[in-house]
Amino acid sequence: MRNASEGSGVPEPDPVDARLGARLAELRAQHGWSLGELADRSGVSRSTLSRAERAEISPTAAVLNRLCHVYGRTMSQLLSEVEAEPTPVVRAADQAVWQDRASGFVRRSVSPPHAGLRGELVEGRLAVGADLAYDRPPVAGLEQHIWVLEGALEVTAEQTAHRLESGDSLRMRVWGPTRFRCAGETEARYLLAVVRP
């Protein structure tokens, strides 16, 4: 619900409408379209498009459906891109931990992914002898920064093996297969920063 700002008489936009408007303006800019061009492509008036981008109105489902068609998105995809801002603090107790007991890999989602953010932080632990191979990245060109906190880790990418000791870091973009191997006589613990392209 819109409320007038104290003393100004100007209604404040709903936070979701504001994020949605900003995302719609961003999508139009990415395509290099003027409001007139988008109006021609979508069948939505320039005035409505302009007011929606400035969060002066809440676009109807019909308007969003037309825009989603033009931008090649489902409505769910578009709305997920404007979810509420991520919680700034992720308490240790709320960090999801997943284990692959067969390989000796433990993964803690220190700063989990969010539709409004491009990066995430993961703590990885590889037991002695653990060896993980991935045939491809989930997203081509994924940016990764690996910082070894304890032990020794061997990371292979682009057919090149990198041995990392405690305190060492490796940064790379992942296009093909990768391999993470505990390279020491104690557990390897590392921090992995992942940034989507």
Image (cartoon, rainbow, N blue to C red):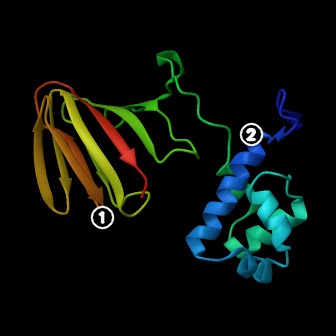
Q: Residue at x 66, y 62 (%)?
A: 25
* Snapshot quadrant of residue 154: top left
**Residue 190 percent across, percent down from the top left:** 26, 32
Disc 2 element? helix
Q: Which residue is mark 2?
A: 15
Query: How many residues crowd mark 2 within 10 Å: few (<14), some (14–19), many (20+)?
Result: some
Taking the image as shown, residue 151 lies to the left or right of residue 16, namely left
**Residue 44 percent across, percent down from the top left:** 85, 73
Per the rendering, the mark at residue 145 is: none
- Any part of residue 155 in sight: yes
Are discs 2 and 1 less than 8 Å apart at CB? Answer: no
Identify whether 66 is placed above or below 100: below
**Residue 17 percent across, percent down from the top left:** 77, 47
Q: Going by the picture, which residue comes out furthest to the front?
A: 7
The three-letter amino acid code for the residue at tag 1 is Gly
The mark that comes first in sequence, 2 or 1, is 2
Q: Residue at x 31, y 48 (%)?
A: 144
Taking the image as shown, residue 3 lies to the left or right of residue 182, namely right
Query: How many residues crowd mark 1 within 10 Å: few (<14), some (14–19), many (20+)?
Result: some
Q: Which residue is mark 1?
A: 176
Choose between 164 and 183: the one closer to the eye.
164
Choose between 67 and 110: the one closer to the eye.
67
**Count of numbered tags:** 2
Identify whether 187 is placed above or below 157: above
